[in-house]
Amino acid sequence: MERFLRHAPARLMAALALHVLLGLAGTGLAHAALDDGYDLWLRYRPLPASQRAALRSGVTGIATPDDTPTVHAASAELKRGLAGLLGRAENAIPSLAQPRAGSIVLSRAELPAGLLDADAVRRGLATAGNDGFVVRRTRIKGDPVTLIAANTDIGLLYGSFAWLRQLQLGAAPDQIALLDKPALPLRVLNHWDNLDRTVERGYAGESIWNWWELPNIIDPRYTDYARANASLGINGTVLNNVNAKAEVLSPSFIAKAAAIANVLRPYGMRVFLSVRWSTPLELKETKTADPLDPLVAAWWARKADEIYRSIPDFGGFLVKANSEGQPGPQDYGRNHADGANMLARALAPHQGVVIWRAFVYSPPAHPDQVSDRAAQAYDQFKPLDGKFDKNVLVQVKNGAIDFQPREPAHPLFGAMPDTPLMMEFQVTKEYLGFATHLVYLGPLFQETLRFDTRAGNQSMTVARVLEGAQDGHVGGIAGVANIGSSRNWTGSTFDQANWYAFGRLAWNPDLDSRAVAREWAAQTFAPDARVVDPVVDMMMRSREAAVDYMTPLGLHHIMGTGHHHGPAPWVDDLGRADWNPVYYHRAGKDGIGFDRTATGSNAVAQYAPEVARRFADPATTPPEFLLWFHHLPWDYRMPDGRTLWTDLVNHYDHGVAEVEAMQAEWQRVRPFVDARRFDDVAQRLAQQRREAQWWRDACIAYFQHRAGLPLPAGVRPPAQSLDDYRKLTFPFAPGHG
Ligand code: BDP
């Protein structure tokens, strides 16, 4: 400690001193101990004394059916969690051969003899499926026990985590009764991790996969990664970048992937790989990569056999093809279904799947032509609906452009009833301030999952589409991971919440993002309203704040070139028209916005008629999507009577004010959060405040220049000239290849 103090920066010292002064050590709020964030939401800090007492009598040991690796993981987690919550040593909680009074009983399939409410538990299990569970306080032969029951081992692990979550949230142990199961079978992280350990769009250090040292050196972090994911129900992980290298399918990398799979398997996580379309050609093992060439198909079938020999539960392939310069079946005059089906047939004998991405767009034929990047995925995939093999899923980004702070849901979600669809969210914040800005993505995920695509006269949310409500084609959900080698995994404390929220909503897309934020805050800081209330409030306003100071009213893709850091609405000279911000905002003397109605690209027609009608008229388009669908004059009247120009400027100002409000709220939690995390978050918020101001100033300066209008009355002029903002460069910005 002394050594640490000598080297601690002054700010941290001051914060520590404040904690000592306030004399809060030992009140159960865990502020004194500096927290490096490694434990994520699985901190298991001692409960307040009264709750500890209530729990203690219910924890005399853990009785498990048998010791499979997954059951072992469940009982180890229970021991770790309960020991932490009770402030005891882990070995103080014994394994038991038989249930006894006060034990936790894990029960798979066969229920223990003498179980009080066996019928009710059986009814629960009948609906719990493979991954679900029943948890309740009950009695066995008169003795009080906590029963965790499931149909499978993985259900027991999920049930154990769910019970521990409730305890961490401060629930009374004898009140906890759970019956739950996931809505979607595939809940998958996509790592954009390269084989040299750099991470595309990664802001949390290097890849956690130490490819060089694998397969013989196994970082214990892999196990903690699996625990964190299993605690949420995430059951798959794609290890490598969608911009894949051929070498990932070489024998030595298959061995490395197999070593990771061995660690993840007990936690119910299956390994997938991103594959490069031209792999056999590049490895010089075929003369073409044409999907209809039998020698190519045979190569992939052999490769699949080889993978399954090392990884018997291998999940399958994720493919980015004919997208942003990646090779694909179109190089040979074939379509996406030809390509996906060829791979699917190689995997089918092993029950593997192909996840084929719909993120495709080609450059416009002429730079000034109205081609619309937002319309292209639909144009290419809609005609292929129903043409994919059974073990193909088409993975669609949440919106039609690219993980912007706000996009309307992708029209493909309402257009592929005969194809199982995967949702692709980006958990890493490529376009939302990296790991610097506090932006809680729960509301973004929720907004997309609840978007009503309409099916005929019926409401059909994106979540129901993924669940197969329309035609029984059940899909899944993927999140581009924000995980790296940084000690706290995600580069910042609050980015842990985005991993958490992704996992919780993948399990249950109907969860409310505010409730999820409450869970996360209580587990990450303390189950105490004095922390949880302000933290949740900050989180819930954070995404709208970012939209306001970056891209209000439906603006999109006006970020800096390549790295996507900061504002650059002026960029107009990139190799492809649809990489330029000016292509997206189209601001000029006459107005601003992208006309996607019938007078423009007509991309709006890709939605179901009811949805399209609403978006086709500026008067019925929700203001948050206004400039996404319409090009409007600067003096267009907004619903409140203000002009579009005034409203736009007000949004930018409001975004900055919201970050200031978040900073003030964070100060309120200072007494209840350890100095280390407090200080780190405070610094990030201060930087977010600076960058929000920069966004606001640069965008207002630029749009004012385009519009040729004076600033609305009372508005503060930008701090610097437009030229100053245009001159800024950011060499070595992270995450950018
Ligand atoms: C864009 C990223 C790029 C990815 C691409 C993708 O800028 O790094 O490779 O998406 O999803 O958002 O394939």
Image (cartoon, grey):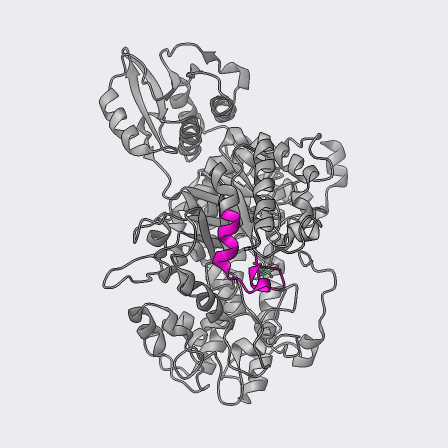
Foreground of the two, 103 or 454: 454
Q: Where does the image place residue 606, in percent across and percent down from the top left?
A: 38, 70
- The image quadrant that residue 698 belongs to is bottom right
The image shows a total of numbered marks equal to 0
Instruction: Note whether residue 270 is visible.
Output: yes
Q: Where does the image place residue 314, in percent across and percent down from the top left?
A: 54, 37
| Vertical order, 166 against 581 (above or below) | above
Query: Magenta stretch?
Result: 320-344
Lateral position of residue 403 relative to residue 616, left or right: right
Lateral position of residue 727 relative to residue 158, left or right: right
Q: Quadrant of the C terminus?
A: bottom right
| Vertical order, 39 against 492 (above or below) | above
Q: Where does the image place residue 561, in percent across and percent down from the top left?
A: 65, 69
Q: At 62% across and 73% down in the image, what residue appears?
A: 568
- 341 in magenta: yes
Foreground of the two, 424 or 711: 424
- 541 in magenta: no
Ligand 1 rendered quadrant: bottom right
Lateral position of residue 628 relative to residue 276, left or right: left
Foreground of the two, 342 or 395: 342
Instruction: Note whether residue 716 is visible.
Output: no
| Vertical order, 73 against 719 (above or below) | above
Q: Where does the image place residue 174, in percent across and percent down from the top left?
A: 32, 25
- The image quadrant that residue 185 belongs to is top left
